[in-house]
Image (cartoon, grey):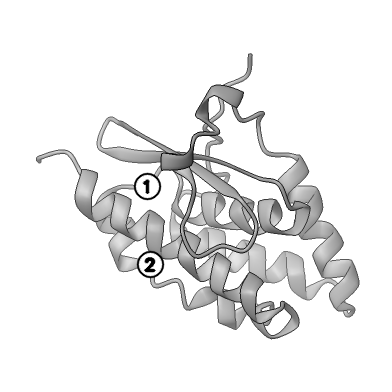
Amino acid sequence: MPDPFPPPPEPTPAEAIAAIDEELKFFDDDLDRFQVIIDWGRALPPFPPEWQQDEKLVQGCQARVWLQPHWQNGRLWLAADSDAPIVKGLAAILLRVYGGRSAAEIAATDPGFLKDFGLLGSLSMNRGNGVAAMARRIQALARASAPAA
């Protein structure tokens, strides 16, 4: 089975945000952008079924979203899954920005970048609230679970 914790292709959260923004700007149409986001979600490594437990559900999401954290070498690795394709794609964006990063990097990366992508206005209010809930959950995991330095 492949590793369920995808490594981020960019070395920093800022570079990941810039790369995602550039990729999304390529498309003029929201439907095309959302299709790419759905494709990103489909490209995530398989999420082990035994992790689909209620305690791993992100509260505040209309869709069911599971988030599995794993600390290794001072970095928070993240795996995610959702029963909604667009939400899984949005989770893929968050994993690309926050996954494999230190607690300090996660804390320093405000989830406001999601608004900058221009996606939240195209989502239903519930979906927008859900992606914000995922970002808050990741930030909370980094604060609460960071290993001692």
CB under 8 Å between callouts 1 and 2?
Answer: yes
- In the figure, is residue 120 to the left or right of 29? left
Query: Are there few (<14), some (14-19), or many (20+) residues within 10 Å of tag 1?
Result: many
Number of marks drawn: 2
Please tell me the numbered disc located at residue 57.
Answer: none
Q: Nearer the viewer, residue 22 or 108?
A: 108
- In the figure, is residue 133 to the left or right of 35? left
Residue at image position (21%, 44%) is: 146
Mark 1 / mark 2, whichever is N-terminal: 1
Q: CA distance from mark 1 to mark 2?
A: 10 Å
For mark 2, give the secondary structure: loop
Residue at image position (69%, 77%) is: 119
Residue at image position (49%, 47%) is: 57
Residue at which label 1 appears: 101
Name, please, the residue furthest toward the bottom. Answer: 121
Residue 106: x and y in percent read 34, 58
Q: Nearer the viewer, residue 56 or 121?
A: 56
- Quadrant of the image containing the C terminus: top left
Residue type at the position of mark 2:
Thr
Q: Quadrant of residue 48?
A: top right
Residue 144: x and y in percent read 21, 50
- In the figure, is residue 13 to the left or right of 124? left
For mark 1, give the secondary structure: loop
Name, please, the residue furthest toward the front. Answer: 54
Residue 30: x and y in percent read 84, 77
Residue type at the position of mark 1:
Arg
Residue at which label 2 appears: 109
Q: Height in image: 118 above or below 131?
A: below
Name, please, the residue furthest toward the left. Answer: 149
- Quadrant of the image containing the N terminus: top right
